[in-house]
Image: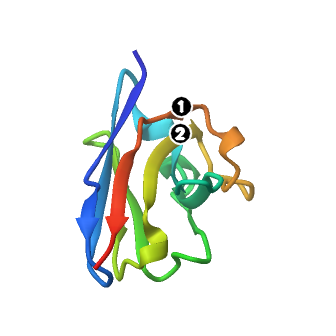
Amino acid sequence: QVQLVESGGGLVQPGESLRLSCAASGFTLDDYAIAWFRQAPGKEREGVACIGSVTTGGIRYYAQAVRGRFTVSRDDAKNTATLQMNSLKSEDAATYYCATRDLSCSSLWHRSERFDSWGQGTRVTVSS
């Protein structure tokens, strides 16, 4: 059974950091691009970051709103991906999801319909 499970969400204050993890089971991540999306209440789901498969160069993409603060990475040996989030802002609060698609992120990586498998999400709250 193909499954993605996110973890690492929680409550932090503005300026603090969180590290989200995405663990895959039932398949190996080697040949998949992995993306992180987020959705805040009342808002559309938006792409945060994406990392392509190693075989396609592992190219990373970031949304403008998080570039320089967030880092996406992958560890295919552990079948996991991570999203390191630094200097968190109140506007980063959302439920974060990881998702996969074949091989590369592509220039349209920020569009959720391009991804096939999704996790259940982990909630991030940023509040003082």
Between the residue at mark 1 and the residue at mark 2, the CA separation in whole angstroms equals 5 Å
Looking at the rendered structure, the secondary structure element under dot 2 is strand
Residue 119 in the image, given as x and y percentages of width and height: 43, 36
Q: In which quarter of the image is residue 108?
A: bottom right
Contact between marks 1 and 2 (CB within 8 A): the answer is: yes
Residue 120 in the image, given as x and y percentages of width and height: 41, 35
Which residue corresponds to mark 1? Answer: 117
Query: Which quadrant: the N terminus?
Result: top left
Q: Identify the residue at the far right of this view.
A: 108
Give the mark, 1 or 2, whose residue is nearer the N terminus: 2
Mark 2 surroundings within 10 Å by alpha-carbon count, few (fewer than 14), some (14 through 19), many (20 or more): many
Mark 1 surroundings within 10 Å by alpha-carbon count, few (fewer than 14), some (14 through 19), many (20 or more): few
Residue 83 visible: no
Looking at the rendered structure, the secondary structure element under dot 1 is strand
Query: Which quadrant: the C terminus?
Result: bottom left
Residue 40 appears left or right of 90: right
Q: In this view, does 35 lie above or below 63?
A: above
The way the protein has been coloured in the rendering is rainbow
Three-letter amino acid code at disc 1?
Ser
Which residue corresponds to mark 2? Answer: 100
Residue 4 in the image, given as x and y percentages of width and height: 39, 33
Q: Identify the residue at the far top of this view.
A: 1
Q: In this view, does 68 lie above or below 105?
A: below
Three-letter amino acid code at disc 2?
Thr
At x 27%, y 42%, the residue is 77
Residue 61 appears left or right of 72: right
Residue 35 in the image, given as x and y percentages of width and height: 52, 51
